[in-house]
């Protein structure tokens, strides 16, 4: 099926075509590792993880690159405040990032480059821009001549006059124009630095991503993605310096996800309402966080409240319970023919899911399709007679679409976990022996582990609370 995606550059949906057949080069801006990531960062990382998974399901080989910004002003400030070196701080929060993302079910990128591992590439990039007249050095700093690059402002859709008068433009007497931005910064005393033809210094933020994207993905990328806050100046400046250097189109499709508000207030450190993922994981199931982040179309703002997280938790449990109940149900079922009407319904679910995700990766509508599968699974569980083959069709659908693509279920296979199975068998034997005190004790023990038992005509069924 044709995939349509909204391109920030053109402000319209376009049909996805790739430079190489069945291969996609995709760059997603990763975190600046001076602190723990917050829920707004996680929206980007979780959503584009699903985009990648869907593209792979559709037959693409995705070369997925997500960087770590491990040197910049915020890391240097954190180093001054803590007394730790910049590399020590970066290492701490890279490890924390992976712990958060592993918990949220985000797959590792094909490559996770660090800025500090690509300094030579950045220096060569900058020297090339200087040679072509797009950059100049002043007192050890190197700046990009924004006005020399035709089309500057094309991604954010701002005119040069708007950009010049914008509040975000840094005032600096060393610049030829207020729109010029730093490619390289001269080191201050005690700062981390590298030797260059212009003296000791460190890279600017924007050049880091351009150099890493070019090294690992080439001159032209199929997809470049990130939060909407990166559109200007970061992505705008990436376009300018990359196209000035290579003479080629930098990115074919730009994708940006919107903000998350906290209780209807924009999330901001100055307001003090930034919620880190590591803290949220102490109070909410990671799958509930993942579900929440996918429950609204990525180009729409989201509103975070405790109520929405509790609702997300209940929704995830409904999906998981339906999946596990059907797994349990088919263990007592006989082998036989597949129910043709169920096959038709499953095929319909597949077509609808793919259609929703092919229309600008609408994860919210795709989740609606998952709940239609939940209702189908619950109907099968309630039937007196089903075949294993029929049940497995629905289980496979869950595992492919709710699991492998959306990442919203724990896939336990078709058997109960050994410990739970052993306890259930022990409880069953206790009931046969009319040792109801032991049977109740085992039920309570499982309850404490978050396992609820249900006695059904087909045997004991269990689910997570």
Image (cartoon, grey):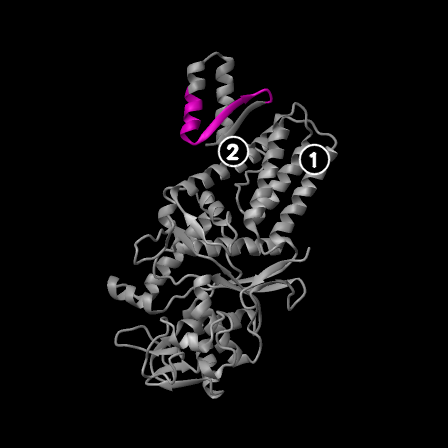
User: Taking 254 as reference, is 4 left or right?
Assistant: right
**Which residue matches tag 1?**
342
Query: Where is residue 223 drawn, in percent x and y?
Result: 56, 65
Q: Residue furthest top?
A: 434
Rendered image: mark on residue 417: 2
Query: Where is residue 107 drawn, in percent x and y?
Result: 51, 53
Where does the magenta region start and end? Answer: 441-458
Rendered image: mark on residue 53: none
Structural crowding at the residue carrying mark 2, measured as other residues with C-alpha within 10 Å and reported as few (<14), some (14–19) or many (≥20): few
User: Taking 194 as reference, is 150 left or right?
Assistant: right
Q: Quadrant of the N terminus?
A: bottom right
- The answer to which of 268 and 212 lies nearer the viewer is 268
Query: Where is residue 197 drawn, in percent x and y?
Result: 38, 85
Badge 1 marks a residue whose secondary structure is: helix
Q: Quadrant of the C terminus?
A: top left
| Position above or below: 189 against 423 | below
Mark 1 and mark 2: span between their CA atoms? 28 Å
- The answer to which of 55 and 234 lies nearer the viewer is 234
Query: Where is residue 114 drawn, in percent x and y?
Result: 43, 66
């Amino acid at each position: 099926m044709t995939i349509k995606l909204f391109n920030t550059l053109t402000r319209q949906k376009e049909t996805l075509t790739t430079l190489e057949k069945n291969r996609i080069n995709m760059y997603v801006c990763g975190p600046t590792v001076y602190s723990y990531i917050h829920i707004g960062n996680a929206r980007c990382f979780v959503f584009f993880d699903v985009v990648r998974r869907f593209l792979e399901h559709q037959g693409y080989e995705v070369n997925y690159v997500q960087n770590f910004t491990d040197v910049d002003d915020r890391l240097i400030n954190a180093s001054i405040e803590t007394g730790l070196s910049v590399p020590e701080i970066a290492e701490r929060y890279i490890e924390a990032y992976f712990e958060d993302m592993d918990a949220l079910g985000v797959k590792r990128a094909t490559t996770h480059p660090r800025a500090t591992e690509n300094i030579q590439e950045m220096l060569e990039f900058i020297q090339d821009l200087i040679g072509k007249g797009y950059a100049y050095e002043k007192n050890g700093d190197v700046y990009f001549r924004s006005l020399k690059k035709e089309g500057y402002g094309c991604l954010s859709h701002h005119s040069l006059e708007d950009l010049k008068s914008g509040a975000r433009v840094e005032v600096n007497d060393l610049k030829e124009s207020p729109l010029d931005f730093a490619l390289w910064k001269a080191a201050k005393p005690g700062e981390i630095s590298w030797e260059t033809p212009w003296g000791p210094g460190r890279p600017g933020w924007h050049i880091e991503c351009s150099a890493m994207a070019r090294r690992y993905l080439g001159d032209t990328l199929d997809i470049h993605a990130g939060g909407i806050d990166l559109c200007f100046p970061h992505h705008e400046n990436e376009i300018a310096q990359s196209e000035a250097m290579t003479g080629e189109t930098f990115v074919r499709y730009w994708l940006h996800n919107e903000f998350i508000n906290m209780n209807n207030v924009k999330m901001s450190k100055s307001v003090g309402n930034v919620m880190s993922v590591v803290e949220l994981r102490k109070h909410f199931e990671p799958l509930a966080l993942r579900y929440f982040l996918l429950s609204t179309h990525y180009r729409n703002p989201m509103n975070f409240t405790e109520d929405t997280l509790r609702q997300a938790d209940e929704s995830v449990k409904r999906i998981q319970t339906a999946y596990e109940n059907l797994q349990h149900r088919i263990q007592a079922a006989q082998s036989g023919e597949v129910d043709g009407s169920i096959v038709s319904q499953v095929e319909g679910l597949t077509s609808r899911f793919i259609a929703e995700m092919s229309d600008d990766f609408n994860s919210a509508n795709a989740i609606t399709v998952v709940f239609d599968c939940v209702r189908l699974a619950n109907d099968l569980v309630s039937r007196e007679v089903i075949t294993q083959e029929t049940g497995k069709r629905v289980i496979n659908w869950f595992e492919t679409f709710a699991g492998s693509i959306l990442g919203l279920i724990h896939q336990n296979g078709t058997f109960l976990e050994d410990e739970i199975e052993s306890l259930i068998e022990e409880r069953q034997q206790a009931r046969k022996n009319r040792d109801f005190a032991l049977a109740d004790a085992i039920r309570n023990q499982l309850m404490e582990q978050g396992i609820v038992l249900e006695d059904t005509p087909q045997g004991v069924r269990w689910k997570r609370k």
